[in-house]
Image: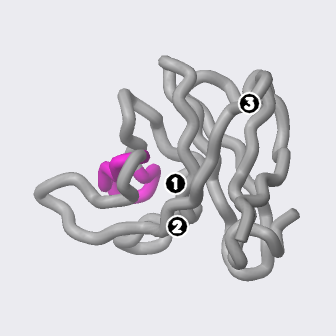
Amino acid sequence: MEEQWIVIGRLSDIPPRGARVIRRPEGDIAVFRTAADEVFALADRCPHRGGPLSQGIVHGTSVTCPLHDWRIALDTGQALAPDRGCVARYPVRVKDGMVELMCVPEACEAA
């Protein structure tokens, strides 16, 4: 099966060290942009108490949950020690200045 990608916006639509949220009934996806213009996509729900990761502070390649300061690695979705847990990751890329999300069954329903 061939990979299918969905354009979700321009890279410039996401502020450096910020996020954009893709709303969907099954749960939101947060698309993050680092200061180095790397892009990551995670479920917008902290594994601790469900806080909105998209409202957290991005530093390096992690985000800090705004509710209880849990740090989540953007590249793996894993909570950083001493915390434990993980969130779903979604394949995302930048092509010609546009951010694209891979159409996996969960993500396709968002488009």
Question: What residue is shown with label 3?
Answer: 95
- Relative placement, left or right, of 50 versus 33 is left
The residue carrying pointer 3 sits among few (fewer than 14), some (14 to 19) or many (20 or more) residues within 10 Å by Cα, namely few
Viewer-closest of 6 and 17: 6
Q: Which residue occupies 34% across, 48% down?
A: 73
Q: Is the magenta stretch mostly helix, strand or loop?
A: loop
Badge number at residue 45: 2
Determine which of the numbered discs, if any, sits on residue 53 in the image.
Answer: 1
Determine the image quadrant of residue 25. Answer: bottom right
Residue 45 relative to residue 92: left or right: left
User: Are circles 1 and 2 on residues that touch, CB within 8 Å?
Assistant: yes
Task: Give amino acid for label 3.
Answer: Lys
Image position of 26 with respect to 46: above or below: below
The kind of secondary structure element at disc 3 is: strand
Q: Mark 3 or mark 1: which comes first in sequence? A: 1
The residues colored magenta run 65-74
Quadrant the C terminus occupies:
bottom right
Q: Report x, y in % for residue 71.
A: 31, 49
The residue drawn where x is 12% and y is 58% is 82
Work out whether mark 3 precedes mark 2 in sequence or the reverse, and give the earlier one: 2
